[in-house]
């Protein structure tokens, strides 16, 4: 039965079917083979049950909030703030890109959205200052996924909902890794900028910084309101997502006045399409998860893992490789929904903090966003920078090495992940 299910799953992936289709067909195969077509009624039941979760309501709301912020030109104010902070350094526009993505990630929670929002602003300026297009695209490709680590992170919400882990702790767990990745990238960008003489240098100005802070105040208030409300006990993460929507709408319509009633349907449509894609995968994974649980696959994998892997460290190292490869081929939400329930029993057996493991999972899947063949952020960055996908990938090699270094640091120093959530939530 297991071999048959794996055959159907990988055959579907091989012919280019969507992950939701592959998972659904695998679930159908199990029910037909084990009990006949009389059991097929369980598939729509499990599909609906998988989507019918209060915690998962946060996903479409955070997506809508990010789209509203994007339309409200919040990204431009955040880029100006980043320029005022690091514009005095050689090669500063690369640092501005990474820092701007970190700021916008605290608003959107989405890697591709962050890549698109910041890229549309910085690419032209970097071209005018003679930055190589491939380097510009590479910087944007690896910086955009920081939005999936820094709260509010959609992938952290997905992991928390799929493993019954505290979503509040998961959101906080992304702060340390997000800052670590950002600092590692910016250190390399500063070195390359100085070595190759990229860009222009403008002296630091306290006045300019104050102006930039004032202009970006509404954008910076968003994560403060969201996270402050959650950890101050005012509302749950799901309720915080709805607050973020109303706040983003208020800023876009009343402050920046870049969102009108006429443009609102298009924004809602775009968010609805993105949400629909994710929720179809969520439902398919629920049906698939139910089928593999009935088949006893998670239990068998857990026994196999613990019999072959004797220490938690070896398990963590092997799982990082699995997650990194999964991120190269799968959408982040789909990978979490598929792999988190399979790995969770082993995580619990070894006494590994599920919040820590979840942060490692999201960090690896973030790397997958700029690692071929899927590399959704690299595709977006290449299109914005007007450079080929292959050129972007070649320029990305140093950043991929730095990403592995950052993951290694998280393995060596778990407190980078666990300190903030455990201090604030316990």
Image (cartoon, helix red, strand yellow):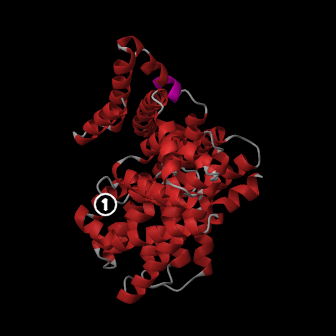
Q: Position of residue 330 (x, y in %)?
A: 37, 47
Above or below, comparing residue 102 to residue 43 in the picture: below
- Residue 353 lies left or right of residue 279; in this view the side is right
Answer whether residue 270 is visible to the viewer in this image.
yes
Which residue does the numbered mark 1 point to in the structure image? 384
**Quarter that holds the N terminus:** top left
Answer whether residue 200 is visible to the viewer in this image.
no
Q: In this orientation, which residue lies closer to the viewer: 49 or 215? A: 49
- Residue 124 lies left or right of residue 311; in this view the side is left
- At mark 1, the secondary structure is helix
Point 47% across, 71% down: residue: 405
Point 46% across, 35% down: residue: 297
Point 38% across, 82% down: residue: 199
How many numbered marks appear?
Answer: 1
Question: Callout 1: 10 Å neighbours few (<14), some, many (20+)?
Answer: many
Q: In this orientation, which residue lies closer to the viewer: 9 or 175? A: 9
Q: Position of residue 408 (x, y in %)?
A: 51, 68
Q: Position of residue 338 (x, y in %)?
A: 45, 40
Q: In this orientation, which residue lies closer to the viewer: 147 or 246? A: 147
As for residue 137 lying within the magenta part, the answer is no
For the magenta stretch, what is the residue range?
47-51
**Quadrant location of residue 277?**
top left
User: Main SS type for the magenta part?
Assistant: helix
As for residue 48 lying within the magenta part, the answer is yes
**Quadrant location of residue 267?**
top left
Q: Position of residue 423 (x, y in %)?
A: 75, 58
Point 31% across, 52% down: residue: 374
- Residue 263 lies left or right of residue 241; in this view the side is left
Kindly give the residue lying farthest to the front in the view shown: 307
Q: In this orientation, which residue lies closer to the viewer: 403 or 40? A: 40
């Amino acid at each position: 039965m297991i071999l048959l299910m794996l055959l159907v799953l990988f055959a579907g992936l091989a012919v280019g079917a969507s992950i939701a289709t592959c998972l659904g067909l695998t679930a159908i195969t199990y029910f037909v083979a084990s009990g006949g077509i009389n059991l097929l009624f369980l598939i729509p039941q499990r599909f609906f049950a998988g989507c019918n979760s209060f915690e998962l309501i946060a996903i479409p709301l955070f997506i809508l909030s990010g789209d509203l912020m994007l339309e409200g030109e919040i990204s431009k104010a955040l880029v100006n703030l980043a320029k005022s902070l690091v514009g005095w350094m050689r090669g500063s526009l690369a640092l501005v890109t990474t820092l701007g993505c970190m700021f916008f990630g605290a608003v959107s929670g989405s890697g591709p959205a962050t890549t698109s929002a910041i890229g549309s602003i910085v690419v032209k300026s970097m071209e005018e200052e003679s930055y190589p297009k491939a380097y510009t695209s590479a910087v944007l490709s690896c910086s955009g996924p920081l939005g999936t680590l820094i709260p509010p992170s959609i992938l952290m919400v997905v992991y928390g909902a799929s493993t019954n882990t505290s979503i509040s702790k998961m959101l906080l767990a992304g702060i340390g890794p997000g800052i670590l990745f950002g600092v590692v990238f910016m250190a390399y960008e500063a070195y390359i900028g100085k070595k190759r003489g990229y860009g222009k240098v403008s002296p630091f100005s306290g006045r300019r910084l104050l102006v930039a802070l004032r202009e970006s105040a509404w954008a910076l208030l968003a994560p403060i309101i969201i996270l402050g409300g959650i950890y101050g006990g005012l509302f749950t993460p799901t309720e915080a997502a709805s607050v973020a929507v109303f706040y983003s709408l208020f800023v876009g319509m009343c402050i920046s006045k870049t969102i009108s009633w006429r443009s609102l349907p298009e924004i809602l449509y775009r968010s609805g399409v993105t949400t629909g894609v994710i929720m179809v995968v969520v439902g398919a994974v629920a049906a698939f998860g139910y089928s593999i649980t009935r088949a006893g696959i998670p239990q068998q994998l857990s026994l196999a893992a613990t019999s072959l892997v004797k220490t938690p460290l070896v398990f963590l190292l092997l799982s990082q490789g699995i997650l990194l490869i999964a991120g190269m081929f799968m959408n982040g939400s789909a990978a979490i929904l598929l792999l988190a329930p399979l790995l969770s029993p082993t995580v619990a057996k070894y006494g590994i903090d599920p919040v820590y493991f979840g942060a490692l999972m999201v960090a690896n899947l973030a790397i997958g966003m700029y690692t071929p063949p899927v590399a959704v952020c690299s595709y977006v960055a290449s299109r914005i920078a007007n450079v080929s996908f292959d050129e972007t990938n070649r320029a990305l090699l140093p950043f991929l090495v730095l990403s592995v270094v950052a993951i290694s640091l998280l393995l060596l120093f778990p407190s980078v992940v666990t300190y903030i959530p455990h201090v604030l939530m316990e």
